[in-house]
Image (tube, helix red, strand yellow):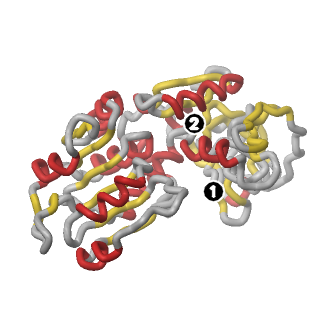
Amino acid sequence: MKQIRVHGPHDVRLDDVPSTPPGPRDALVRMAACGICGTDVSFVHMGGITGRPMALGHEMAGVVEWVGTEVDTVAAGDRVIVHPADEELGRMGSGAAEGGLTPLLLVREAAKGRRLFPVPEDMGLQVAALAEPAAVGMQAVNQGEVTPGDRVAVVGCGPIGLLAIATLADRGIRDVVAIDTSRRRLELAQQFGAAHVVHALETDMWDELARLHGTAPFMFGPTPATDVFIEASGSDQILGDIIERGRYGGRMSLVALHYAPVPTNFVQVLMKQFTIRGSFEYPPRFEDAIDLLARRDLSDLITHTLPLEQFDQGLALLEGSKDCGKVMITFGGGE
C-alpha cells in the first residue's frame, strides 16, 4: 500500500508499506481527498515525532470499502469524514501508524462510533475533507469566547484563519478585521465574512484597528478597542505586539504554532488583565464543523488539487506561496 511518510528532517517519501489486516472492530476507507496542513510541513522539517517513519495525513474524507463484524454505525459504500484524533488510539497522520495520505486507510476501532462521520448528501468529498481544519478554526473562535458585538481581529488568513472568519460570520459576528500580507487571501477573507481587510505590508495594522474599532483608554495611552485577537499567523513579533498593544480586558486565542519560546511582557498581561488562551484541535462536538460546511459555501478555500504522487509539489506550494489556500491531495480525481 502507498503511504506518504516522513523518515527524517526534510526526508518525505511515498513508501510501499505492508497492509495490516483489519479486525472485527475496524473499517477500511477508500480515500477521496486529504488536505496538506501546515503541521505536515512542520513534521517534515522536524523529521517526524515518533522515532520511526511517520505517516502523514489528517484531513480526510472518502468512501467506506469494508467494515468489521462489530462495526454497526457505517456500512460499505457510505461517504465519510475520518476524525483523526483519539486519546486512546493516537492521532491519525500525527503519530499513529496510519495516515490519510494513502489510497486505502485502515481505521482502527471504527466500532467506537467517533471515528467516522457521514458526509451530507449534497457535499462533495473534497469539501468534506475541510471538516478537520474547519473544526480547528471553530475551536479558535470558541477559545476566544467571541460573542455578538465583539470587535475581532483575525491575524493570518491561511486556511485556519479563514475558517475562523467563516465561523465568526456564521455566528453573526459582524465587526471582523482580517489581516494578512496576501491580497488573494484577503479576498477570500471578505468572501467568507470579514467586514474589513488590512494588507499588513501596505498599511499599519494598529493604526487601522484604531480607525476601524476605535480606541480604548489605558494608563500608558489609548489602544485599539479590538476585543478579541485570533492569532493564526505564527509570527512571533505579532504575538508580542498583541500583548503590548492590545486593549485593557482584551483576549487572544492562540491557534498558530510557535515552536520556539517567545519573550512575553507579563507586566502588560497583568496590568491589562489580558487573557491569553491556547486553542488546540476541535470543539467537543466535531459535527459542528461539518454543519458549518453544509451551511456555507467554503469550497473556494481549496485552491490546488494534486494526485498523491505529486505530494512534494503540494508541500512546496504550501511553503512557497503566500496566496495558496488549502492544497488538497485527491485520489482518482476525488469528488
Residue indicated by mark 1: 85
Find residue 304 and report its horizontal and vertical position in percent.
51, 24
In the picture, the quarter occupied by the C terminus is top right
**Residue 285: in sight, yes or no?**
no
Residue indicated by mark 2: 35
Foreground of the two, 114 or 225 = 225
Q: Residue 4 vs residue 173: left or right? A: right
User: Residue at the spot x=41%, y=59% of the render?
Assistant: 254
> Which residue appears farthest toward the top when viewing the image?
333
In the picture, the quarter occupied by the N terminus is top right
Q: Amino acid type of disc 1?
A: Ala
Question: Between marks 1 and 2, how big is the CA–CA gap?
Answer: 15 Å
Q: Residue 139 vs residue 73: left or right? A: left
User: Residue at the spot x=71%, y=54% of the render?
Assistant: 49
Q: Secondary structure at mark 1?
A: strand
Q: Amino acid type of disc 2?
A: Gly
Foreground of the two, 27 or 12 = 12
**Residue 275: in sight, yes or no?**
yes
Mark 1: few, some, or many residues within 10 Å (few <14, many ≥20)? some
